[in-house]
Image (cartoon, rainbow, N blue to C red):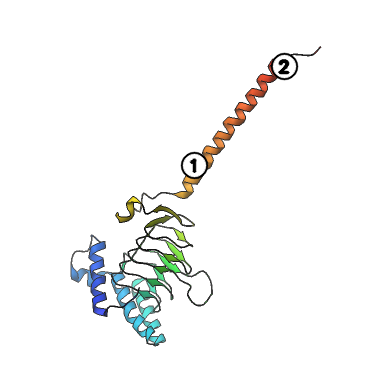
Amino acid sequence: MGQGAGLLTIMRSDIRAVFDNDPAARSLPEVIFTYSGLHAIWLHRIAHILHRNKYFFLARALSQLARFATGIEIHPGAVIGKGFFIDHGMGVVIGETCEIGDYVTLYQGVTLGGTGKERGKRHPTIHHHVLISAGAKILGAITVGANAKIGAGSVVLKDVPENSTVVGIPGKVVIKDGKSVKQPLDHTHLPDPVTQAFRKTERELWLLWVSMHKIHHQLNESKKEKPKVN
């Protein structure tokens, strides 16, 4: 995982990722000059080289320039693979010790953050071909496996297995090695584990009420049938 290929090769893969993921992309000049997500990742790749060579101030200055220009904040220490795509991108935050594999897609408002002031590895590791939907928060030194999909607005605090879909707060795996792994993620029709739990509880309460009603009825019937003692 990481930036092992040449910089120009990686930048070409970033352009290809835009065309692969965004049907609104019409031409190469449009993508190069108007896509803020592409600008952010390219500036990050330069800032990361500076950071790796211990030009920490210059690296942070460049990352702050990118943040000001694009609304996307990527710490220069983060390691990001090829074919990285940020769609729209406003509000995306990627922490210092993040490691992101190849062909990962992020939507606006995604946070790959830490959970406190601990040092060392404190941000997520995202494997290849992961899709993270709008507003999702992935927090802590956890791992998201290859081909995983994170639903919009989810808060993920635990490791996510590969080939799975996670939704909810806190995030729960709702599809694992399932049918939709190779299908585009439908952001508006995701299973909701919280709603499913409420429905199950509601059904159990209904069955309990029916049982109590039957017992009450049986007690009343037995009182009626009981002979009176003179």
Residue 60 coordinates in the image, percent (x, y): 40, 82
Q: Mark 1, residues whose alpha carbon is within 10 Å: few (<14), some, or many (≥20)?
A: few
Q: Is mark 2 on a helix, strand or loop?
A: loop
Q: Residue at x 66, y 19 (%)?
A: 221
Residue 219 coordinates in the image, percent (x, y): 67, 24
Q: Is residue 46 left or right of residue 113?
A: left
Q: Which residue is drawn at 36% across and 80% down?
A: 48
Instruction: Pick the quarter of the image with the C terminus.
Output: top right
Residue 205 coordinates in the image, percent (x, y): 56, 37
Say above or below: 98 vs 176: below
Could you say which is closer to the camera, residue 65 or residue 47? 47
**Numbered mark located on residue 183 in the image:** none
- CA gap between label 2 and label 1 equals 41 Å
Residue underneath mark 2: 226
Say above or below: 155 vs 70: above
User: Could you tell which of marks 2 and 1 lies nearer the N-terminus?
Assistant: 1
Residue 11 coordinates in the image, percent (x, y): 25, 75
Instruction: Pick the quarter of the image with the N terminus.
Output: bottom left
Q: Quadrant of residue 54?
A: bottom left
Amino acid type for the residue under numbered disc 1 = Arg
Residue 184 in view in this figure: no
Q: Is mark 1 on a helix, strand or loop?
A: helix
Q: Mark 2, residues whose alpha carbon is within 10 Å: few (<14), some, or many (≥20)?
A: few
Say above or below: 192 vs 62: above
Q: Which residue is drawn at 33% across and 52% down?
A: 180
Residue underneath mark 1: 199
User: Answer yes or no: do the residues labelled 2 and 1 have beta carbons within 8 Å?
Assistant: no
Could you say which is closer to the camera, residue 179 or residue 94? 179
Viewer-side label of 2, 1: 2
Q: Residue furthest front?
A: 177
